[in-house]
Image: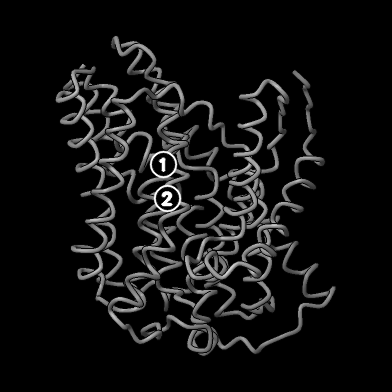
Amino acid sequence: MLTFELDALSTLALALLLLGLGAQLKKRSYWLRQLCVPAPVIGGFGFALVIWLLRDQQLLNLTLDTSLQTPLMVAFFTTVGLGGSLGLLRKGGKLLFIYLGACWGLALVQNVVGVSVAKLLGIDPLLGIMAGAVSLEGGFGAAAAFGPIAENLGAVGATTAALAAATFGMVAGGLLGSPLARWLIERNKLTVKAEAVGNLKAFEEVVHTPPAALDAATLLRLLTCIVVIMVLGFWLGGSLQQHLGIVLPSYVGAMFVAIILRNLNDRTQAVEMPDHAVSTIGDVCLGMFLTMAMMSLKFWELEKLGLPLLVILVVQVVIMILLCVFVLFRLFGRNYDAAVLCAGFMGHGLGATPNAVANMGAICDHYKVFSYKAFIIVPLCGAVLIDIVAIPMITWFINAFS
């Protein structure tokens, strides 16, 4: 078998090429546009599928260095934080708590479904938990953390099952989120209008920032702010872990620091931060990160799932779709913002918060109306607030069924 290893720079170059290819395919394909599939998913998913087929035929084994994924992800969430004025957070109010309650409820539902279906199929309930909130709402990080714990309690292959389930969830969440939201909008004939400060014009009125061209000086100023905030965020996360034992996802610290500095800057006007320029940088970082994540998917790990775990995951996906269509869409307000939130919920409920953001971005790009309410609520809830309940709940389930 031919073997290649790409270094970090070569992997980044490949990701950029695949991102551009995905954008062109989406531009030329009527069905891809109608389904609102994000360009990074198109390019990255297709590449990962080809690599899987070549590997299966013993023709090629490709190793990617994805070490740049984390800084690109943190940079993107830093730009999200720079868009989070307190005015917008306050106006998220009731809806934010409804969405957060839905996230907590989903963690419970996924664990109950995983355990129940595992028992019906005659496999270890711990493997059902691995195919529940651990790998789906928890993502790769939780899968890697809780898998060894389950193995120590006697669940053979729990780590492999959890990581494979997380891969399945990321693929399903990335492919289904945007089409579901599009279907909700078209079926319910919704007015494509974001409420309150949900569109860019209203957002600019809140922060009183005049439009500015993305010239070299503006780009340098914003890149400096973003990188400094990233460093402060990593420092904050490390300090919390060292002194208080609080472990946060790598991007949460940077996002919180960005929100604080953004609101201080709103009062002092010390640094000019055009929102459209910040958004542009964020879109580029998200595109590169998500393409890397998708192109490095190891589909051959899904072969190790076995039929029982595959059945559990299919049931989980079906329940997610039913929850979004019949329950959450109504709870979120049955409007355009609600549909965008459902796209995000599918993304991080099955995969990861970047999936959620990409799903929402695809919908907003398709309809040319940006829901800042959704872009603040989903990362905040999906990234950190959900862990307040989800992690203790997962721990309880593992101990209860070990």
Mark 2 to mark 1: distance in Å? 6 Å
Q: Is residue 8 left or right of residue 203?
A: right
**Residue 330 position (above or below residue 227):** below
Whether tag 2 and tag 1 are in contact, CB under 8 A, the answer is yes
Location of the N terminus by quadrant is: top right
Q: Position of residue 356 (x, y in %)?
A: 45, 56
Specify the amino acid type for callout 2: Gly
Q: Position of residue 383 (x, y in %)?
A: 43, 50
Q: Position of residue 115 (x, y in %)?
A: 19, 29
Density class for disc 2 (Cα within 10 Å; few <14, some 14-19, many ≥20) is many
Mark identifier at residue 173: 2
Q: Secondary structure beneath disc 2? A: helix
Q: Tell which of 267 and 391 is nearer to you.
A: 391
Location of the C terminus by quadrant is: top left
Q: Secondary structure beneath disc 1? A: helix
Q: Say which residue appears at 32% left-offset and 25% top-offset.
A: 307
Q: Say which residue appears at 25% left-offset and 71% top-offset.
A: 94
Q: Position of residue 318 (x, y in %)?
A: 27, 48
Specify the amino acid type for callout 1: Gly
